[in-house]
Image (cartoon, rainbow, N blue to C red):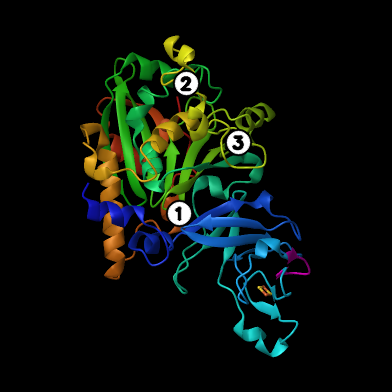
Amino acid sequence: MNKEISEILVRTGAGTRMGNVMRRYWVPILASSEIEPDGPQVRVKILGEALLAFRDTDGRPGLIDEFCSHRGASLFFGRNEENGIRCGYHGLKFDHNGKCVEVPCAPQLCSQMNLKSYPCIERGGIVWAYMGPEGKQPDPVGLEWATLPSSHVFVSRRWQQCNYLQAMEGGIDTAHVSYVHRYEVDTDPMHMGTKALDYIKADGNVVFDIEKIPSGLALFGRRNGEADSYYWRVTQWIFPWFTLIPPFGDHPLGGHAFIPIDDENCWVWSVNFRPDQPLSAQELHDLQSGRGVHAVCEEGTFRPVANKDNDYLVDRKAQREKRSYSGVFGFAIQDASLQESMGPIQNREAEHLLPTDKPIAMARRMLHEAAMGLEQGNEPPALQGATQRVRAAGVLLDRSVSPLEWAQEHLTDSLEKPLYSV
Ligand code: FES
Ligand SMILES: [Fe+2]
């Protein structure tokens, strides 16, 4: 990919083309449980902007500029009390909308001291913010997992030390699963013991097809199923940063969101959910222990215990003994290790794409089109909540069935329809 296009896609700060596109969507900021009424405020950097999240006395989430409008002190050292944050330095107070409500030494100047702030909503156990222009706020997020009761969903987030795009490309590049994750699936509680694994192992010659659909891209991976059927794995990429992973047997469904912190860091949100019932105690225990697509983080942080500074605890013996393909354990850390190893921003001028990279090329094209189109006044895709109501699936279909037609009927606006997983 040439430098000019790559620069457009990887830069997401305020005023950048891609940043302008992303600011048209609800952005996941932090877990609802991270802020409590009058509890400690939390610094959050999103799309290159230094912000502060807090929950006021009445329980409303606020997302405001981290720095005080007086002389720029961080409100991290302020007091969250009586429905607002009071700066620790000279006592200016701001409410959850960033409105200045008190200037102790000069009350008449209050109206000139407001802070930048972004509206927030809470869905699926996450605080989401709208960071875009006024009057363009989209529907609340329509993604299935974001609309379920909290008992049905487990979300975690981890800090990844690279640009969001190379992390997200890993989510779209389903071809890597047969390599780096190869040995993990047999022992992981979110994958093991399923017919899906038998089909995946029996047919190493997966054939991919990709379709552009209103929500983004649908990726169809075809393997031999039974004598008269194919086993199809349908992955969804939902514009601009969500993926839905095809499920395994009756294990929970899963997905990700890849959100820029700044141009060299991102949040990887990982989600498991059951549309029709709460997650079991055992499942919650496994997910909290970093199984499935989650990771164990250092106490009180979002940095995985296995990280860049310790070579992700690579275990050469386990690699030799074929307990881990790369020597690194855990889906999340396997992905992080390879994606971070490309450098903070992958040099895409030096890459050589292969046929299996077609989904990545298509996703890049869609992102680029949206970035350029927005400047011409064209609305980006999948802004409507209803458009985001798609599902991933694993399904056996008669060899004569067109998977695209099948998916249009069964996976689009699919939330009232049966789940497809083998
Ligand atoms: S810097 Fe915040 S009140 Fe002075
Ligand atoms: Fe992966």
Q: Is residue 412 visible?
A: no
Q: CA distance from mark 3 to mark 2?
A: 21 Å
Please state the quadrant of the image where ligand 1 appears: bottom right
- If you read the primary sequence from the N terminus, does the residue marked by circle 1 or circle 2 appear first? 2
**Left or right side of 79 for 189:** left
Q: Position of residue 49 (x, y in %)?
A: 50, 62
Q: Would you identify the image quadrant in which residue 129 lies?
A: bottom right
> Does the Cβ of the disc 1 residue fall within 8 Å of ligand 2?
no
Q: Amino acid at mark 2?
A: Val
User: Disc 2 marks which residue?
Assistant: 185
Work out which quarter of the rendered image holds the C terminus and state it. top left
Secondary structure beneath label 2? helix
Q: Would you identify the image quadrant in which residue 13 lies?
A: bottom left
- If you read the primary sequence from the N terminus, does the residue marked by circle 3 or circle 1 appear first? 1
Judged by depth in the image, the label closer to the viewer, 1 or 2, is 1
Q: Give the residue displayed 70% in from the left and 76% down from the top.
A: 92
Extreme residue in the right direction? 82
Q: Position of residue 306 (x, y in %)?
A: 54, 30
Q: Give the residue displayed 40% in from the left and 32% down from the top.
A: 338
Secondary structure beneath label 3? loop
| Magenta stretch: includes residue 209 | no
Say which mark, if any, is on residue 413.
none
Residue in the foreground of this view, choosing between 189 and 276: 189
Q: Give the residue displayed 28% in from the left and 48% down from the top.
A: 364
User: Disc 3 marks which residue?
Assistant: 297
Q: Is residue 108 above or below residue 127?
A: below
Magenta residues, as a range? 79-87
User: Disc 1 marks which residue?
Assistant: 262
Q: Residues within 10 Å of mark 3 (few under 14, many from 20)?
A: some
Secondary structure beneath label 1? strand
Q: Position of residue 28 (x, y in %)?
A: 53, 53
